[in-house]
Image (spheres, rainbow, N blue to C red):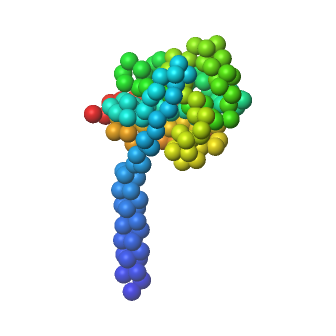
Amino acid sequence: MAGMLHRRLAATALALICAAALSGCAREQAPAVDYTLLDGQKASSQQWAGKVMLVNFWATSCATCVKEMPQIVATHEKYKARGLDTVAVAMSYDPPAFVARFAETRKLPFGVAIDNTGSVATAFGQVQMTPTTFLINKRGEIVKRYVGEPDFAALHGLIEQLLAEA
């Protein structure tokens, strides 16, 4: 009797593990968003198709955001030729003049969007904490969400994997 109970528990545990593993394969699609870049150019998440995207929500008043930005830039520069693109989304409460000055003085080499209505942050699941960074694969699926500064070595490893995917 005890042996049968153990087998049933083991089978149930195995079924739960398999279900959890399979559900991990189904990734959430990145939301469809439209946004305006600092230069006034209109952009859309539809333009991300076929690229690995790094979407970084940040603010000029966020010390961690300012600290991590050189590493976001270095990551972009390291992988852009292989298909990584980056967009830095300034939070709605960040004064546009501050964002423009930051982008200009730091020579940010990627698109900077001003989310003045908060619609982009809302679409990505009510982003409120900065920095929050999303890594999106070529199929438009959210692979990873980082709240706070990412472990950049691990992020680079994940980017390498995603760029290698067909």
Residue 32 placement (x, y as % from top left): 43, 41
Pick the front one: 151 or 113: 113
Is residue 114 visible to us here? yes
Residue 137 placement (x, y as % from top left): 38, 37
Pick the front one: 48 or 32: 32
Is residue 150 visible to us here? no
Q: Residue at x 39, y 71 (%)?
A: 12
Res 30 → quadrant: top left
Q: Is residue 125 left or right of residue 128?
A: left
The image shows residue 104, relative to residue 159, as above or below, that is above
Please identify the quadrant where the N terminus is shown: bottom left
The image shows residue 149, relative to residue 101, as above or below, that is below
Q: Residue at x 52, y 44 (%)?
A: 124
Residue 85 placement (x, y as % from top left): 43, 25
Q: Residue at x 58, y 34 (%)?
A: 115
Q: Is residue 104 left or right of residue 159?
A: right
Please identify the quadrant where the C terminus is shown: top left
Q: Residue at x 40, y 65 (%)?
A: 16
Residue 89 placement (x, y as % from top left): 56, 31
